[in-house]
Each structure stands twice: as C-alpha cells, then as structure tokens.
Amino acid sequence: MEALLKINSETCIACYACVRACPVKAIRVQTEKVKPEIIPERCIGCGSCVAVCGPGAIEIRNSKDELKKILGTGKKVAALVDPSIAGEFPDITDYRKFVQMLRTLGFHFIHEVAFGVDLVAREYGKLFKKTKGKYYLMSNDPVTVSFIEKYRPGLVPNLAPIIPPVAATAKVVRKIVGEEVALVHISPLIASKDEIRRFEGDSRIDLAITFVELRELFIEANIHETDLEYSDFDAPLGYKGSFFPVARGIIQAAGIEEELYRTPVITVEGEGMIDAIDEFEENIGTIKHHFNLFYKEFLMGRGTSAGGKRFLRQSQLIKYVDKRFKTLDIEAWSASMDEFEVLDLRCSFTSDDQSLPVPSESKLNKILKEIDQLKPSAVGCGACGYASCTDFAIAIAQGLAIPEMCNTYASKNRQDHIQSLKISNEKLAQAQDLLKKSERLAQKEKEAAREASEIVRRMLHKLPSMVVICDMNLKIIQTNNSFISMLGEDAREINEVVPGLAGADLKTLLPYNFYNLFTYVLAQNESITNRDIRHEGKLLNVSVFVIDKDKIVGAVIRDMSAPEVQKEEVVKRLNEVIDKNLGLAQQIGFILGEGTSEAERMLNSIIESYKPGKDQKDP
C-alpha cells in the first residue's frame, strides 16, 4: 500500500521545516538526494510536517477514489462518523442535513462513533476500578499508540487493552446490519487511514477518509444542504461519547472523577504527550495515575480543514452536543448500552521498535568536530530540528541528517565557498585576459597567414610553369592561370565562375596517362620528376610531388616548346650528356687523343651560348 505521507520532490524547496517539526525524526535528509524523504516505517502519522510545509509539498494518501469504488460496487456501505463533525462543518446549519448529504453521496447507513465512545468509556471505568498497582496509557489516539509501539516499546504492556471507539462502533454496526456491510470511517485524523489495518474480524474497517476529503467529495458530487431534507443518524445514538473530540471528553463519558486530588487519570494533549510518556516510564511509581493521551485533540486533527480555531470549534461542539442531549431518548440509549455489553472490546498491541543504534563517542566527536561544535560554546540553536548538537550528530551518524542542516556549519561553508568563488573569479579574469591576448595574437597570425597565402596565390599565377594541387580524390584545390590556359577555352570560362577550378575533377580535364601520374604518387607516396608527356600536340615535362602524405599532391608542368624552357632544357640536357659520357671519354682518350678534347670544347661552347647573361639575344 502507498505510504500515508510522502514528499513531492518537485514542490519541495528543501527548507527542512518538516524535519524540525517531526517529533520522531521520521524524515531523512541525504546528501545525494538533497530533498528530504519520509521513512514510512518510522512515521507515526501525526501530520506535524503537513502543517508546517509552506509549499504544500507533503502529500497525504488520497482515499477518495477508493471510496468511490466501494460506493459503486452495489454493496451496502455504512459511514462511521466521528463526533468532531460539529467543529468541522459549522457551515452546515443542521447536523441532520449533514446526515442526508452522506446518504445522497451513496452511504446506506450513517452511524456516529459517539456510541462506540460510550461503550469504550464504560470499559475504561471498569478497568481503572479493578486495577491493582498497574497503571495504563489509554489507547484511543492512534498517534500515541504508534509512538509507544515504535519508540517506547517497553511500555507496550501498559497500553490499555481496549479497542478504540471506532472499532467498537464497527462491531455494533456489523451486529445490526450483518457481516457483509462495508464500513468507512470518516475521521478528523490522517493517522486513521493506517490505524484501521489493526482491526480484524467483526471490528474490521474497509477504509478511512478525512473530513477534508469528505468536503471535496461533496463539492465533486454537487451536494448542498439547501437541496436536501433532514435525516438522522441510525441507531444506536451516542450520549456523552459526543464529547470525545475534546481530550477530556472520554473521561466524562466514563464518569471518572475529575477533581485533581481524587481523579485516577492525568490527561495530556499536544506535543507534551511525548514528555508525559517519558515521565510515565521514569516515575510511574511516584505518579501512580493512568494517562489519557492525545498528540492532538481530535477536534483539531490534521484531517480537518486548515485554519480552524480551537476554542471556536469547541464551542460549536458544545452547542451540537447540547442540541443532541435535548432530543436523545436516554432509555433507548441505556437499553442499547445493555444490549451491546456482551461485545468483546479487548485487544492487544505489539512492539515495532524503530530505535536506531547510538554511535560510539569517537564517531560522535568526529562529526561534532566536522560541524565545528566540539566545544563548550557549541550553539545548540535547534535550527536543525534536533534538541542539541549531540542529538544532531547522532542523527548524522544514523543517516537521518546531513551536516548542511546546521546553520553554523552551513554559514561557515558558505563563507568558505564565497571566498573560493572570489579566488576562482580572479583566476578566471586572469585567464580571460590571457585568452583575449591569445585571441588577438591568433588573429594577427591568421591575418599574416592569409596575406602569405594571398602572396603565394598571386605568385602561382605569375609563374610561367603550370601548377596544380589536388586532393586524394583528384579534386582540384588550387591551380594557376598557366594550367587553366593549357586546358583550353572551356576551362577559362569555368574559371570565371569557379575561381581556380576549385573542386573540379582532374579525371575529367586530363587524359588517363596524365592524371594517372597523380594517382600513382598518392598511392605510393613517391614523387615523380621530369616525366615527359605529349598533350594536345605539345611536349610537357611533368613533376608530381607529395604535399601531405596520402591526402594532397601537387604538380609543376612545363611546356617544352616555350623559349625559356628550351634554352634551360638544352643546357640541362647537354650537361647530363657531358656528365654521363665524361668517364667513358676519359677511358678512350688515349685512342682518340685530342679529338675528344675538341668535342668537349665544342659542346661547352654550345652550352655557354644558351646560358643567360650573354651578350647575344635570345632567338
């Protein structure tokens, strides 16, 4: 089953107000989760966290849909109504209109829990009269019972072995209507939603809803008292049990003496309930009284509408009870009390110890040192929600709290963090200055590189030799005008649209034997120099070289028919002939004698005639 209370992490602002309000510290805060979470097995259902949560992030398990299902089954359904209705529904002018509104909603039987209070009160009167030396904690408040079972298990035997009034009422209704009837408790407490799990057999209850949920159901069903006639509660009706919503109400219903020096019972309600239980445990041998305990009067339970005024509600309750007394048939009530005296109202309780191991002193000291509270002047402000710094340290060790919940620790960390941020900001500012300088330098270098690139591009276009650079797919990266001119008129027209023929495919511009030189160099990463190729009737001298291994190659192509190339090439090739044959000539010189020397002089004279810098003009 869904937990009674849970925190909506999207709505929660992690203010820890709920942690401070929880009397049993059933709300855990963990570093990795940041937002608090309710531990269901530790929760006693008091609803204190709900009351203090400003954003409304704590959600109560909704029972409206389940009630609609029960009412829609066609099964007979009875409502067990707590007498606190007088304080919750003052806007309904007559309680009989309220009863009819419940019937209109779909309930077949409407019974007031006040009669169950009368039965239980009688049992308490009997118990207190016959007890000899044993003192009891009255077990009418589910929050009190849950607290004792979970956090004071040693006192479980002192819980009065009497079922609560709503369970007694369930027994009465089943005896009248039959075992198959479905029972719904309409309660001022959210804890009632879990309390009903205790009840078995003829005291079992199918569902509990709060007064707040009942209001919402009336609105959803468009049910208004002005549209309805009167209808009364089904018998048996209650008598002084109607005072039950007030803490001392059940004492009056039991007819127990209330004068201070004669009463056997001490009544405590509110958060002082826990202190009262501790005193009972420590000093009952001296106190020698039974305790009537309520964490909160039912009249002001967490299942009632927020903002209700306690004494205003109390006055409304008194007026309601007075009105009921005037019309109550005392004889009929007395007869009903006699009729149902045979009911077994006994019960037992079981401990559900939720106490956690107390950490060692060394571990506590380590935590206290961490939060800077290991000193006589430890603040102990209680802002964390714990009674002392030591209790807070224990909670940290038990995994229920985190150091950041301590204001002193959080403030110190905040200052340290601010200082750290300041230093980081200064370093960041310095880094930004360096980055700006670096960006300016990079921009200058980029501009210089762009200028250099432009110079190289212009130089390429001025060269008489043809130059082309391409990528691994033989797509042109850059060319010069000489190469474009070699390709012809079509290439020049394309150059007007796409400067430098960038992206053009060499394979579509050159024949296979030509572009295959580029393919070879890319594949072998080995340059080719001075390869003669005939293209379009011209003899071209081609050198292809690697620029970027496996990626980019370039070529320099010379037209061998160009005058400047002819002179240079003749000189070059004559030098190659002389160098190649000089050795051979020297070997046979003794045969040819001076003839060889004369041939060498003739060749040198030819070479000199082609070298630049001579007085003769080029042909």
Image (spheres, grey):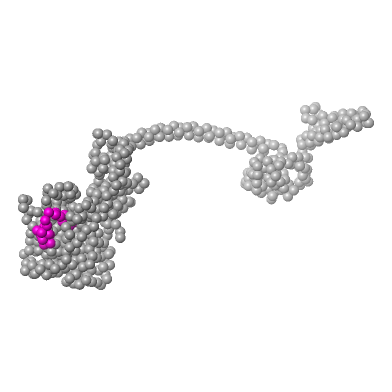
Residue segment shown in magenta: 121-141
In reply to whether residue 617 is colored magenta, the answer given is: no
User: Residue at 26% across / 66% down in the picture?
Assistant: 68
**Which residue is at the front of the view, 84 or 286?**
286
Task: Locate residue 216, reporting x and y percent.
Answer: 23, 61
Residue 591 is at least partly visible in this image:
yes
Give residue 483's quadrant in the image. top right
Q: Is residue 589 above or below residue 288?
A: above
Residue 52 position, x and y percent, is 23, 49
Residue 394, position as x, y percentages in the image: 28, 43
Q: Is residue 215 visible?
A: no
Residue at image point 42% right, 33% down: 427
Q: Position of residue 173 (x, y in %)?
A: 17, 69
Task: Identify which residue, 540 or 518, lies in the foreground.
Answer: 518
Quadrant where the N terminus is found in the figure: bottom left
Name the residue rendered at 55%, 33% in the picture. 445
Outermost residue to the front? 132
